[in-house]
Image: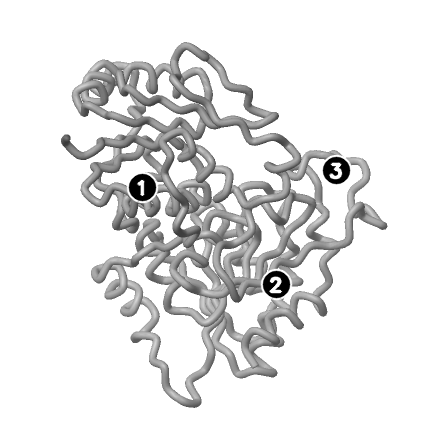
Amino acid sequence: MPPPRILVIRRRYLGDIVLLGPVFRNLRLHWPNARLAAVVEPAYAPVLMLNPDVDETFVLPRRLVDWPAFLARLRRAGFTHVFDLDNNDRTALLTRMTGAPLRTALWHERSRARWRLAYTADVYHPPEIHEHRSIVDYYLAALQSASVPIATREVRLVPRAQDIATVERLLGGPRAAQPGRPRRILVHPGSRSAFRMWPAENFARVCDLAQDELGAQVFVVAGPSEQTMVAEIRRHAKTHLVALNSTLSIPQFAALAAQFDLMLCHDSGPMHVAAAVGTPVVALLGSQNPVLFAPSGTGHTVLQPPLPCRTCVAPLRCMPGDSYHNYCVRNLTVDRVWEAVRKKLV
């Protein structure tokens, strides 16, 4: 019997694609000779280059004219198993068009299985389970339909040699494990939601304390749209912070994060990348679920203010129940964040 050809569909976002790692790892352990592929949007395809278990990536077309060829390629691939972890109208159609004998929909209370005829199996994650386990466990639940045992939940990305060389030049040398070497802290102050961002002056204060009291070297990195935040942090800081202004690809950022002793950040895609390359993180959360998207692995600290908020910082703008539209993270104090950073480095 020929080895299985397996497709996993998860279009976005960065953290979600990183956390697919255990799905591919368990499939590989169960079927060592299987052909494993993924469907993602163009922006997130590069992260799969760092997953040694992924053999092929199908990048969703941007232009309507490219769709017929894309669908034909998907059909020709001859998939035997498809796991649709998005479960929307478009991905249901993609799943059906593969013609795979096993086509699984994964769903929970907020994303009811659509287009039932597109699938041959579905896996339901009830709210009492979904809201209290990692999203990794949610993804892995889809493998029940193929009787794939769960041997590992490890999330791992492997930086490429060429990207490591690039960031070592950027940092002025490799990360050397030598006695007395200054600790390196990477600060990523960005977030997909402006409501989830800790104030620049607070980041600056923690950076100053790290450099003054621990002799650490602090580097700040952010995407092109977040450079204003970097400038604000540097304006408030009393010590010299190194701003990494180079535009980095996702693989380059993974290699960069691996060079640091700690990353201070929000709950974000870069947080998951850092954790997946083995860098401890101190993550700042607002009102979002701290279990669902916690950084993978051990050695991380997740900070969240007491909820519900005792004192709302923006009562006219915050939207209770919508973690993308409230400022709860601003109720984290500098002292609490600094203590978490200090404990990681002393």
Q: Is residue 80 above or below residue 184?
A: above
Which of these two is toward me, 153 or 58?
153
**Could you give the CA–CA distance between mark 1 and mark 2, rounded to whole angstroms?**
41 Å
Farthest-out residue, bottom = 179
Q: Is residue 31 visible?
A: yes
Q: Residue at x 43, y 33 (%)?
A: 144
Which of these two is toward me, 78 or 271?
78
Q: In this figure, which colouring scheme has been used for the structure?
A: one colour
Q: Is residue 301 above or below residue 331?
A: below
What residue is disc 1 on? Answer: 27
Q: For the residue marked with disc 2, what is the amino acid?
A: Phe
In the rendered structure, which disc, 1 or 2, sits on the residue that comes first in sequence? Answer: 1
What residue is disc 3 on? Answer: 318
Q: Within 10 angstroms of label 2, few (less than 14), some, or many (20 or more) residues?
A: many
Could you tell whether 164 is left or right of 78 in the image?
Answer: right
In the rendered structure, which disc, 3 or 2, sits on the residue that comes first in sequence? Answer: 2
Q: Residue at x 26, y 31 (%)?
A: 58
Q: Indicate which label's residue lies in the foreground, 1 or 2.
A: 1
Please tell me how many numbered marks the rendered image carries. Answer: 3
Which of these two is toward me, 285 or 95?
95
